[in-house]
Image (spheres, rainbow, N blue to C red):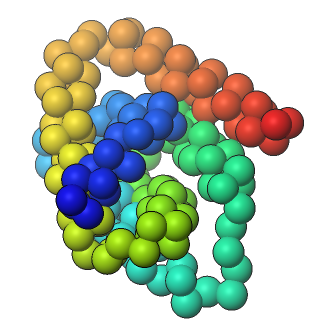
Amino acid sequence: SESAAGAMRALGGAVQLLFLAALALAARGRNQLVALAAMFLMGQAASALVAPHALWQPAPRFVEAAGALTVAYLAVEILLLPQAGARWVIAGVLGVVHGLYFRLFLQATGYQAGYVLAGAALAELVVIGVLALVVFRLPRVAQKVAACALLGFGIVWFAVRLRG
């Protein structure tokens, strides 16, 4: 049940799903998709596991605003730096931000991190795989349009979270 809760948390919001879409868009092939997904999951797990030992405890609004910025950042990278190297490093850093969602969830529920993160990782990998099948079949122009839409969403959602 804790793994199922982790899966539901991983896919429970627009920001999380749109980030996974941005991750699929950012990959230039299967090998890079595997590297991006692996680094994202490692960053997410590391953040969720290390955050309880940090002195700083982020507010839920901050975490959601930061998550929206990860979508916008990855969209900017896709649009302005399409051939950028070491995108896997960026995926790991952005995974750290998304791990804060799980930190808050673990703190609120008292669930065991291993089960929650395993369920979340499995759900995210399935969604990334399905999104990649769609994205890799899109023409380049459609991929650019999708990246623009993700950028717009990220910026608007960030502004909404700052105001509300």
Relative height, residue 88 to residue 103 (above, below):
above
Give the position of the C terminus as an image quadrant. top right
Residue at 78 percent of width and 33 percent of height: 159
Q: Quadrant of residue 48?
A: bottom left
* Residue 11 visible somewhere in the drawing: yes
| Number of numbered tags placed on the structure image | 0
Residue 155 picture location, percent across and down: 69, 31
The vertical placement of 134 against 120, above or below, is above
Nearer the observer, 105 or 158: 105
Q: Quadrant of residue 53?
A: bottom right
x, y (%) of residue 45? 36, 70
Q: Which of 83 and 44 is in front in this view?
A: 44
**Is residue 78 visible to the viewer in this orientation of the structure?**
no
Identity of the residue drawn at 48% across and 31% down? 14
**Nearest the camera: 18 or 73?**
18
Q: Please state the horizontal and vertical placement of residue 144, each as a whole percent of the image.
A: 44, 17
Which residue is nearer to you in this view: 41 or 53? 53
For the N terminus, the quadrant is bottom left
Residue 2 at what x, y percent from top left?
A: 26, 63
Look at 39% across and 35% down and name the residue there: 17
Is residue 122 positioned above or below 133 on the image? Answer: below
- Which residue lies most toward the right here? 163
Q: In this view, does 69 lie to the left or right of 62?
A: left
